[in-house]
Image: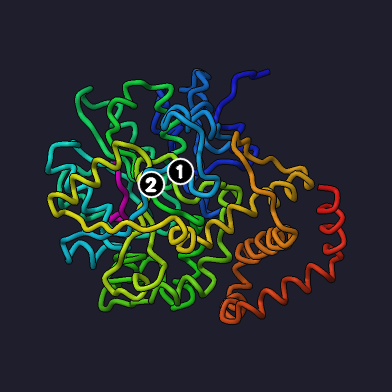
C-alpha cells in the first residue's frame, strides 16, 4: 500500500486549487496541468512512471491546507495582526502615471507600471505573469515576461482558471543570480510561499510577490455561458479580453469581422460571477493575498469608483514592497495617495463578507462527510445567515453545471433578489431550514 502522499490525494479529496505549484516544482517533471472540461478547471495529471514519490508535490500544495500562522511568522516575523486584512505597512489608492497603461489595464495599471519600473531599474530580470494564448484565445498562458512589451501583453485581468505556478519550473532552471517578480492570486502565492520553504534557491530568486484580490475564479463554463448567451461559437473567437479599456472595463470578444463588447457589470452580473464557482474557491479564507509583499484590487469606493481611467487599492505588507512603492512614486512611475483602513474594508466588503462565511461552509461540508482544507489561522464566528448563503452558493453552482438550465439562469440573474427568494423557498420546501437551524444551534 502506498504510504507516501502525492497530489493524487488532494485531487481525490477535491481540494485542488489548480494553481500549478506541484507541476512547476516537481523534480521529475511527472506532473502536467490539464483541463478537466467536465468541471471546467485545471487539475494535475501525475505520470506514475516518472514519479518517485518524493512528496514534494504534496508539501507545496496549498489545496489541502495552509499554516497561515507559521507562514506569517516566516514572512513578516509575526502572526497576522489584522484578522480581516492580514499584516500590513500602509494602505493606498494609486494608478500608473502612463495613461495608456492605466486605460488598457484592469484597474489603474499599477501592477503593470510597477513591473516595468522594477525591470527597467534592474531590480528584476523578469516577471511571472499570465495572458490568454494567441493560438487558443480561450485558454490562459502563464509565462516569464522579460521585456516591457511582454509585461504590457499581460496587463489585463483573466477570469478563468490559470495554473500560473507551472512557470516556476523556468525560474528554478535559470541562473542563480536572476531575480523575478511573481504576480498571482492568493492560491498561487500560497503555493509559492510553501515552495520557497522547500527550495531555498527559489526563495532567493523571487524579489517581489504581487498578490491580487480575489473573490473566486469562474470556471471555463462561465466563459462558455457568455459565448452561448451572445450566440458565438468557441471556434469563431480570435481574441478574448475579460477586462480593459477604462474602468470598470469590459469583455471584448474579437471575431473575424467584428468585435463584441460587454460591460463588466453586465456580463459579471448575468450569472458569470454567481453560477460558476469552483468548489475549492468557496473554501478559501484569503481574498486579499495576505502572503504577498503588495496586494492590489479595484478601488470600489467613493470618487474612485466613478473614475473612468481606473484606480487600485494597494496594501503594502513588507518592507520590500513598501520600498518599491516609494521608489516608483519618487521617480513618477506611479501615483499614490494614503487612505485609512476603513476605506479598504469598505472597498473589499464583498470579499470580506465571503471570508466571514467560510466556517459555515466548512461546517456544512463536514456534515456531508466532505473534506475541507486544514488552515492554521483564526476564524471569525459566522452569522446564522452564512449557513443559508452557503447552501444557496452550492445550489447556484449545481445549477451552473446544468447547461440545459442556462437560459433560465439568465432570467434568474437579471432579477437577483427574485432568484434569492426562489433559492430560499426551495431550501425551505426541502426542509433544510430546520436542518440548518438545528446544526447552527449545536455549533
Q: Residue 290 carries which label?
A: 1
| Image point (44%, 27%), residue name | 74
Asked whether residue 126 appears in the rendered view, the answer is: yes
Q: Residue 266 carries which label?
A: none
Q: Position of residue 245 (x, y in %)?
A: 27, 71
The N terminus is located in which quarter?
top right
- Pointers 2 and 1 in contact (CB under 8 A)? yes
In the image, which residues are magenta?
Answer: 128-135
Judging by the rendered image, the residue that carries numbered circle 2 is 211
Asked whether residue 253 appears in the rendered view, the answer is: no
Q: Where is residue 371 in the image (x, y as percent from the top left)?
A: 69, 40
Q: In this view, does 152 lie to the left or right of 299?
A: left
Q: Is mark 2 on a helix, strand or loop?
A: strand
Look at the magenta stretch and give its main secondary structure: strand
Q: Where is residue 75 in the image (x, y as percent from the top left)?
A: 41, 31
Give the class, few, some or many, for how many residues have Cα within 10 Å of label 1's Cα (few <14, many ≥20): many
Above or below, 172 relative to 242: above
Amino acid at each position: 500500500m502506498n504510504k507516501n502522499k502525492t497530489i493524487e490525494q488532494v485531487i481525490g479529496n477535491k481540494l485542488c486549487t489548480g494553481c500549478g505549484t506541484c507541476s512547476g516544482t516537481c523534480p521529475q517533471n511527472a506532473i502536467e496541468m490539464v483541463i478537466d472540461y467536465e468541471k471546467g478547471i485545471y487539475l494535475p495529471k501525475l505520470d506514475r512512471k516518472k514519479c518517485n514519490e518524493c512528496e514534494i508535490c504534496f508539501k507545496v500544495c496549498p489545496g489541502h491546507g495552509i499554516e497561515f500562522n507559521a507562514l506569517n511568522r516566516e514572512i513578516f516575523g509575526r502572526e497576522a495582526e489584522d484578522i480581516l486584512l492580514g499584516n500590513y505597512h500602509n494602505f493606498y489608492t494609486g494608478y500608473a502615471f502612463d495613461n495608456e497603461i492605466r486605460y488598457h489595464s484592469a484597474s489603474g495599471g499599477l501592477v503593470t507600471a510597477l513591473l516595468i519600473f522594477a525591470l527597467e531599474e534592474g531590480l528584476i530580470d523578469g516577471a511571472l505573469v499570465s495572458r490568454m494564448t494567441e493560438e487558443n484565445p480561450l485558454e490562459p498562458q502563464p509565462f516569464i515576461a522579460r521585456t516591457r512589451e511582454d509585461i504590457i501583453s499581460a496587463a489585463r485581468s483573466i477570469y478563468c482558471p490559470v495554473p500560473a505556478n507551472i512557470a516556476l519550473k523556468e525560474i528554478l532552471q535559470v541562473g542563480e543570480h536572476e531575480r523575478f517578480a511573481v504576480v498571482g492570486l492568493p492560491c498561487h502565492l500560497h503555493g509559492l510561499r510553501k515552495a520557497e520553504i522547500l527550495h531555498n534557491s527559489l526563495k532567493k530568486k523571487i524579489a517581489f510577490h504581487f498578490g491580487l484580490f480575489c473573490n473566486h475564479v469562474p470556471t471555463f463554463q462561465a466563459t462558455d455561458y457568455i459565448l452561448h448567451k451572445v450566440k458565438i461559437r468557441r471556434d469563431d473567437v480570435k481574441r478574448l479580453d475579460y477586462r480593459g479599456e477604462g474602468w470598470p472595463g469590459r469583455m471584448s470578444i474579437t471575431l473575424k469581422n467584428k468585435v463584441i463588447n460587454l460591460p463588466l457589470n453586465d456580463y459579471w452580473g448575468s450569472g458569470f460571477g454567481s453560477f460558476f464557482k469552483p468548489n475549492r474557491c468557496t473554501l478559501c479564507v484569503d481574498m486579499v493575498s495576505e502572503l504577498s509583499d503588495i496586494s492590489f484590487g479595484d478601488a470600489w469606493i467613493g470618487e474612485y469608483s466613478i473614475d473612468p481611467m481606473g484606480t487600485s487599492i494597494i496594501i503594502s505588507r513588507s518592507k520590500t514592497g513598501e520600498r518599491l512603492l516609494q521608489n516608483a512614486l519618487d521617480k513618477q512611475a506611479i501615483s499614490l495617495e494614503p487612505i485609512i483602513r476603513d476605506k479598504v474594508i469598505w472597498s473589499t466588503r464583498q470579499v470580506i463578507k465571503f471570508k466571514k462565511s467560510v466556517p459555515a461552509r466548512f461546517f456544512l461540508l463536514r456534515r456531508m462527510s466532505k473534506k475541507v482544507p486544514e488552515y492554521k489561522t483564526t476564524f471569525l464566528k459566522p452569522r446564522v445567515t452564512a449557513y443559508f448563503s452557503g447552501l444557496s452558493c452550492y445550489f447556484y453552482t449545481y445549477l451552473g453545471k446544468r447547461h440545459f438550465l442556462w437560459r433560465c439562469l439568465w432570467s434568474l440573474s437579471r432579477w437577483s433578489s427574485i432568484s434569492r427568494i426562489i433559492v430560499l423557498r426551495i431550501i425551505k420546501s426541502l426542509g433544510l431550514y430546520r436542518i440548518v437551524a438545528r446544526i447552527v444551534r449545536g455549533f
